[in-house]
Amino acid sequence: MSTHFFENQDAARRNTKWLVFLFCLAVLAIAAMIYALAVFLTGTQPLDAYGREIEITLQWWQPDLLVTVGLATLAVVAAGSLYKTSQLRGGGAVVAESLGGTLIASDTGDPDERRLLNVVEEMAIASGTPIPPVYLLRDEPGINAFAAGFTPGDAVIGVTRGCVRQMSRDELQGIIAHEFSHILSGDMSLNIRLMGVIHGILMIGIIGYFLLRSSMFAGRGRRGGRDNNAMVMLSAGLGLMLIGFLGTFFGNLIKASVSRQREFLADASAVQFTRNPDGIAGALKKILGFDDGSILQSPNAPESSHLFFSQGLRGGLQMLFATHPPLDERIRRLDPSFEGRRGSEARGGEARARPAAAAAATGFAAAPEGSALDQAGEPTVAHLAYAAALVRGLPPAVTVAVHEAYSARAVIYALLIDRDPGPRKLQLEQLAHFGEAGIDRETRGLLPEIEGLDARARLPLIDMALPALRTLSASQYEMFKTNVAALIAADEKIDVFEWTLQRVLLAHLRPHFERVPPPRVRYSSLARLTPQCSVLLSTLARVGSRSQAELRAAFEQGASQLLGAEPDLPPPDRCGLAALDAALERLAQASPSCVKQLLTACAACIAADRKVTQAEGELLRAIADSLACPMPPLLPGQRLA
């Protein structure tokens, strides 16, 4: 792919920062308009005790009033925003359900739904993110999709019925790659916050509406004479409604501009991911020639319009408030030979399809370009092909089991069953006595297939089980979590894979079943995290070292990559996997620039002996996952850093 796409990404990021700044200015402008209204109302001619008007000269500079109005405006906008944001705290599922979406069961037998889930599954494994739940908007005939959520851990993918039925696999893959770009780039969090801010501005107009209604009621209640208070309320209500309308108008205008810039970025990222511009271009061409287009019918579509893959609304102000660039422009950036709307209709909206499987296979066959850390958050076609090959290589019995809530638990249990007869017997007895009814037999039945798996398939298998495990009831989850801990403790020690499994599994299940606040950035420097850095690097160094000299060399190699921290190699009793758990809880509060340093240091520590074991690769994935950094799988022959 040419560097043209990367230039678009850089330009979109710069423009987005500027447009967000403009949004803040819009809120300040609203406060200024309300201040002007307040000054006008305080200058309204009141009546004395005899009904005569008292003249008052307008004073535009009133510091006390300015402070009062400014604080009140910010309080109203903030309260409205927080209220709306709190409604969305459930993550993307709340947005999907508000649009009429229903969760697609992970074991669905519908061929269209199964194809969609397979595409999402491959994309998630390739990008190193948890597999998101997928919602189908069954009442929407238009072609559209969206990603919603605060973090990759609570993200969902939503797809309309028209999209599932009308798209080929290549086109569907292009759309889903576009949505994964929004997940990986952090667009989702910004999008939900934009929904909150718009609602906060809308509160100004709502307050004006209630003041207007109250003034009309007060006017009717007075049988004669003039009611000055009612007139003031009427003026205030009309003024606030107008200001609220103007604020919402400009807020939506800026929201649309932010969204349009990010759509170009997501299109470029989708092509980078799939190496198949014809896939996403073909999807856009089909929308262009489709009778229902990409329009959504849901009454809640307007507030979520900036989330969609394509423009979801129609109306007289569509071009002004369009949250997406024109289809023709998006298509031409992907396919410079595109002839425009007429050419698309003449060809029936079909793309010049290039088989994605062939493109993926080509990318997979080529030597991996760049280090694994360079591609964190930016997976390539090679990762997509690698993920697809892993999924295809799973035994059919395992593939079926991992997509069903009951047997998915057996898959996880089977991954933890020890090959040593002693602990193995204790583990199976644990499941027979304290596990779900019949789960020990289900686990025994899957053991031969699980034990025969390539070790590289173990972490993807955990990811594949997550959607089914999220459907457990609260009591089932508690039982499952207890059994996982008991199976790990059966041999009275914990190895790297057991720790990794538990860490990855609970990191993505706990927020769904327990009230776990998301980590907040508290550290912009690693200086105050030196003890945690020491535990992190020493644990990694001990996993791959065979001598004290190798241990110290690996530790020092990693420590050299850290700025502001001077870690010391702690004694064995102060490090290890248990200590690493506590260290990661603190390190997860570091800024993104610090996280980048930490992962670079981890990679340097692992690569000090110029080889990467399976245990080291799995441990690094769990560490990156704990630090909220999506890390694609390590490709054969690829360097870490």
Image (cartoon, rainbow, N blue to C red):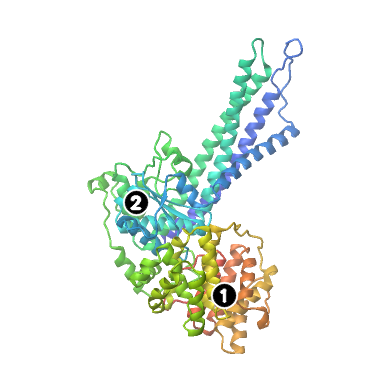
Percent position of residue 86, x then y: 58, 47
Dot 2 amino acid type: Arg
Which quadrant of the structure image shows residue 559? bottom right
The one of 99 and 1 positioned closer to us in this rendering: 99
x, y (%) of residue 245? Answer: 54, 32
Q: Which amino acid lies under the numbered mark 1 shown in the image of this protein?
A: Cys
Q: Quadrant of residue 180?
A: bottom left
Q: Mark 1 = which residue?
A: 602
Examine the rendering and report whether any part of residue 634 can be seen: no
Quadrant occupied by the N terminus: bottom left
Residue, x 73% and y 21% (percent of image)?
Answer: 57
* Mark 2 neighbour density, 10 Å: few (under 14) some (14–19) many (20 or more): some
Q: Taking 162 as reference, is 623 left or right? A: right
Q: Are dots 1 and 2 in contact, CB under 8 Å?
A: no
- The residue wearing badge 2 is 332
- Mark 1: which secondary structure? helix
Going by the image, does 494 lie left or right of 57? left
Residue 439, how many percent across, how many down?
44, 69
Q: Which of 464 and 444 is in front in this view?
A: 444
Dot 1: few (<14), some (14–19), or many (≥20) neighbours within 10 Å?
Answer: many
Q: What element carries label 2?
A: helix
Q: Which of 597 and 535 is in front in this view?
A: 535
Residue found 53% across the figure and 38% down from its top: 250
Q: Which of marks 1 and 2 is nearer the N terminus?
A: 2
Q: Residue at x 64, y 38 (%)?
A: 76
> Vertically, is 455 above or below 310?
below
Q: Is residue 331 visible?
A: yes
What's the mark number on residue 410? none
